[in-house]
Structures are given as C-alpha cells and as structure tokens.
Image: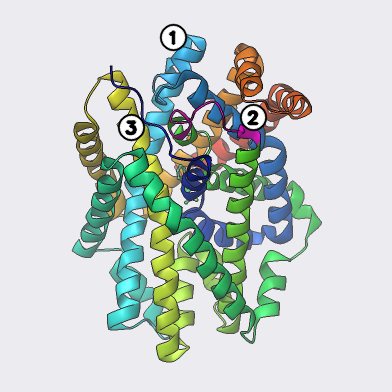
Amino acid sequence: MKTKEKWESGLGFVFAAAGSAVGLGNLWGFAYRSSEGGGLAFLILYVLIVLIVCLPVLVAEMVLGRSTASSPFIAPIKAAGENWKPLGWLFAIASCGILSYYAVIMGWTIDTFFHSLFIGLPSDMNEAGQFFGKISSGNSVFVGQIISLLLTAFIVLAGIRGGIEKLTKWAMPLLLVLLLLLAFWASSLSGSWEGYTSFLLKWDPSQLFDKSTISNSFKQAFFSLSLGIGVMVAYSSYLDKRNHLPKEALRVASLDTAVGLLAGLITFPIVMSFGLRDVVSESTVGTLFIALPTGFANLGLFGRFIAAVFFGLAFLAAITSSISLLEVPVSSLMDKLKWSRKKSVWVSTLLIFIIGIPSAISTDFLDRSDAICNTLLILGGLLISILFGWIVPNRYDEDLSNSNSNLRVRRYLKFMLRWVSPPIIAIGFYLTLVSTLEKFV
Ligand code: PHE
C-alpha cells in the first residue's frame, strides 16, 4: 500500500487550516451577523464561544484525524466503532452541502471582481439592487459556479503538498497584508469611527441573552472555524506526531478571529460613510454584494481599484476554504472505496455541482441550505465533544501526550471537552435548530 501523503511543514498545516477557516464567512458573515442587532454583545459571545467551547473541539477534531490517520468518513469508526458511522456521513453531507452553495457565492465574487475592473459598479441604492439581481441570476451564475468548482478541483487534484499547501503558503500572508492595508485605508474615511461604534461596538447588554444573537454567535463560530464538518479531520490525517496541536489550534482560531475583526474594520466605515446602513442587516448578502460595491463606486476610479483588490482577496480567501471542503469527500472516497485522487475529485465535484444548481437559481434556497448546514456543523461539534469527552477520552490524552503537550494544557482541554463543551454546544444547537426550522414554516 502507498504511504499516506504528509504536510511538508508544521507551518504549512497551520496555513492550510487557517486558510480553511478564513473565508467568505469572515468577510460576509461576521459583518452581517454583528450588524443584526448584536453589536458588541455578539462579538463578546462569539469570542467566548471560540475560546471556551470551540478550541477544545478544534483540538479534538485534529486528534481524530491524526490519531486515526483516516479520512473523515472512516475516522469516527476507527476511533470508536461502527456506532459512530453516522458522524462520518454527517461530515460528508455537510461538506458537500456547504461547498454546493459556497461555490455559487464564489461565482458572485468573481462577477463583482470583473465589474470592478471592466464594467463599473452601482452608484446608488437603486442601481445596487439591480446589480445584485444581475450577478445573482441568469447564466452568469453558473459560469461563476463552474469556474470556482473547477479551480477548486484542480488544486485538490494536485494533492496535499503540491496543491493545498503550495497555495495556502503564499495566499494567507498575502491576504493578511491586503486586509491590513484596506483596514488602514478604511479608517481614514470620514464615517469610520461612527461605523465602528454603531456596529461593532454598539453596546446593548440585553443582547447577551437574546436568542438570535446567541444562535448567530454559535453559527459564526462554527462556520468560521470550519468546525464540526471533518475538514480538520481530513487535514490532520496528513500530520505526523510532532505537531503541537493545542498551540496550532490556538493559532488557527486567533488568525480567524483577527480576520473577522479586520473585515468588520473595513466594511463598517465604508457602509457608514456612504449612508448604506440599512442595507447591511437587510439580507444575508447585503453587506458584501450590495453595500460594499456601492460604497466603493462612490470613490470613483480609485474606488473601483480598491473594490477589485477587495473582491480579489475575497475570492482568494474563499478558494483556500473551498479546497478544504472538497478534501472531505475526496479523501473519504479515496479511503473508503480506494479510488484514485483523480477519480474522487471529479466524481465529488460533479456531484457538488449538481447539488448546487438549486442554490444557483434561487437565493432563497441558498439561504436555507446555509441554515441547514450551519445546524449540522454545530451538531457535528457536539458529537465530536461527546466522542472525546465521554466515549474515548483516552485516545485524546494519548495522542496529545505523544506529541509532548503540556500536562496542564491537556488536563484543561480534557475537562472542558467533557464538562463544558457538550452542554453549551447543546444549547447552541437547540437555538440554531429552532431558528432553522422557523425558516421553513
Ligand atoms: N470557514 C469558512 C469561511 O469562513 C467556510 C467553511 C466552513 C470552510 C466549513 C470549511 C468548512 O468562509
């Protein structure tokens, strides 16, 4: 049997995992969800959920991949027996589901990028509505969706070292530099301070107990960290024992949160200084594809240039996430059916394209798929924490002690995974399930 591929370096793994985490969810979800009324309360809840609840689960997901050296479909069975087979299915379904509509949004991103460069952007709200209508309907959506899926497929086809690691190694640093530059530029806009205070820093303590703010924080934390869906299992199965997982999980989570914040620091000043406030919380995609293009257009030719940088960067962030989503079914097919990487990539990509057709046609469908998949992610996180907190806690401990993790850190993580994560995630899951079901009645 061929030996399994490995990451070239520990840093390569961190960049790839952070690349998966940093994506459209940071650029679009973070701004949208924090503007839905939560403000600072959302931010606080989100950070607490990431630090207290998600970090131990992120380490657990990495342990699941590394200790079994198996794909997300097989890993739960290897770790805890046949009873855990449904978790593998959940990983496969959720990752294909997310990629099916994620590729559609990537397509809109490409379209907006081209409009910034060659055609022009909407100059007021009327035009903005039409603009979004144009990029989100008709044949151009399919073109964008197909280009995004093909690019994703080509990178995954080139394998872990030759494709995923090679791309994320330069894309992530570039992304950070561009984001910092844009945030710096946005801070010089006239409404910048007002933008920060009326969205990110808006303080209303009652929001801390608001059901939809709490559920939004959970959704954002899990989606943004790519948690509960097998991505980290897939990536970690290519690790060797040396990597210090708790430290790497912390790096991934910090980078991801920093990018979410940076995106807010870019978005809100633009939204505020061009009076686009109401657009932001109106629809899930309002900020990214309606308010931002209009804001940029108000700055003339220079604005179009900045818009091209922003949407180019958004696409880059998205593709480092989409490859991780595709790697879940691909590695699972390779593992379970012993298919070649090539066959697994093309079969998965075709299937995902077909599942994504309704989302390409209807933004309503897309919105619902997003709600369902977010709920599945949180359920996945809950099951992983139960798996390692209660069913096979020794595997967690053993794997971490093999890589010389500090005893105190290990004890802390084990405690959190057993006693803290499961009940808190269960609450998040319940609230999110209810809000998802509400979308269907
Ligand atoms: N974390 C990615 C983002 O923020 C999306 C994603 C979710 C990627 C789940 C992989 C798994 O855009």
Secondary structure state at the residue bearing disc 1: helix
Q: If the image is split into quadrants, where does the N terminus sit?
A: top left
Q: Which image quadrant is residue 190 in?
A: bottom right
Q: From what the image shows, is residue 112 above or below residue 217?
A: below
Secondary structure state at the residue bearing disc 3: helix
Q: From where the camera sits, is residue 84 visible?
A: no
The reply, left or right, for residue 11 in relation to residue 145 is right
Which of the marked residues, 3 or 1, is nearer the chain's N terminus? 1
**Mark number displayed over residue 323:** none
Name the dominant secondary structure of the magenta segment.
loop
The reply, left or right, for residue 148 in relation to residue 30 is left
Q: From what the image shows, is residue 44 above or below residue 387?
A: below
Mark 1 lies on residue: 82
Image location of residue 86, percent across then percent down = 43, 19
For badge 2, the amino acid type reads Ala
For badge 1, the amino acid type reads Glu
**In this rendering, the label closer to the viewer, 3 or 2:** 3
Q: Within 8 Å of ligand 1, the CB of disc 1?
A: no
Q: Are marks 3 and 2 in contact (CB under 8 Å)?
A: no
Residue stretch in magenta:
235-246
Mark 2 lies on residue: 426
> How far apart, in angstroms, are the residues tagged by discs 3 and 1?
19 Å
> Residue, x 43% and y 27% (percent of image)?
90
Instruction: Looking at the picture, tell me which residue is in the foreground, 130 or 380.
Output: 380
Mark 3 lies on residue: 329
Q: Which image quadrant is residue 340 in?
A: top left
The reply, left or right, for residue 347 in relation to residue 418 is left
The colour scheme of the drawn protein is rainbow
Q: Residues within 10 Å of mark 1 (few under 14, many from 20)?
A: few
